[in-house]
Amino acid sequence: MNPKFKNALDLFLVSFLFLFLEIAFIRWISGYVKIVAYFTNIILISAFLGGGIGLLIKKRKYINYFPAIILLLIAAVFSYQILYASYIDLNITPDIDTLTETGLESKTVSEKSFLAKVLLPEGEWIWGTSTFLIYVVPFFFFLNALIFIPIGQLLGEKMKKFPPLKAYTIDISGSLAGIFALSALSFFLFSLFGGFCLDLSFI
């Protein structure tokens, strides 16, 4: 294979992977971890943070950690679902006596943790937010950022092989392809988990 074509293909696939995973995680994590859905741009920001850090890192390669990190994120989401389901029946609205007995009654602003005061509006009640759930948000923020560090590092390495304008042209083309691919998968009701497995095959 022509070296120039191979380098262009590598850059295209890395850009494809970045945008595909970014949009997929925005949809998938917010769908399974409801508290994250309250902060619509949190996954987007963490993806940019991780990608930016990756672009700055030059000495040590982290791409070998990518499969382990993405599997850790998937396991964390499913673990959250199991834990959440064990405490809350989504089909039943608990009465005030039940909430009081289980310690999940609505907290006043003064009783909320610092993080809850910052991130949640006054009077909001979400499954003992002040004691546990609110800390899920920064956890998934940083875990998602970790996933995009090796991708950003790989993206930077591939872009250096081309002049800036050509590199960005290939990068944007791959990014658009990633968006269209996820849209097609969504249209045909293809599982996002299957899409993650497809992405792992690129590494």
Image (cartoon, rainbow, N blue to C red):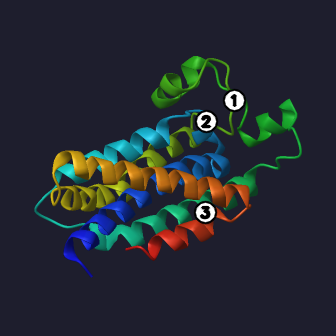
Q: Is residue 177 visible?
A: yes
Q: Nearer the viewer, residue 179 or 133?
A: 179
Q: Residue type at mark 1? A: Trp
> Which residue is more in the foreground, 39 or 4?
4
Secondary structure type for disc 1 = loop
Q: Is residue 18 visible?
A: no
Instruction: Identify which amino acid the numbered label 3 is placed on.
Output: Ser
Give the class, few, some or many, for how many residues have Cα within 10 Å of label 2's Cα (few <14, many ≥20). Answer: many
Distance CA(mark 3)–CA(mark 2): 18 Å
Residue at the image point whose x is 40% and y is 72% from the top = 68
Is 151 above or below relative to 194? above
Q: Is residue 59 left or right of residue 34?
A: left
Of mark 3 and mark 2, the one earlier in the sequence is 3
Q: Which mark is residue 129?
A: 2
Question: What residue is pinned by disc 1?
Answer: 125
Q: Mark 2 and mark 1 in contact (Cβ < 8 Å)?
A: yes
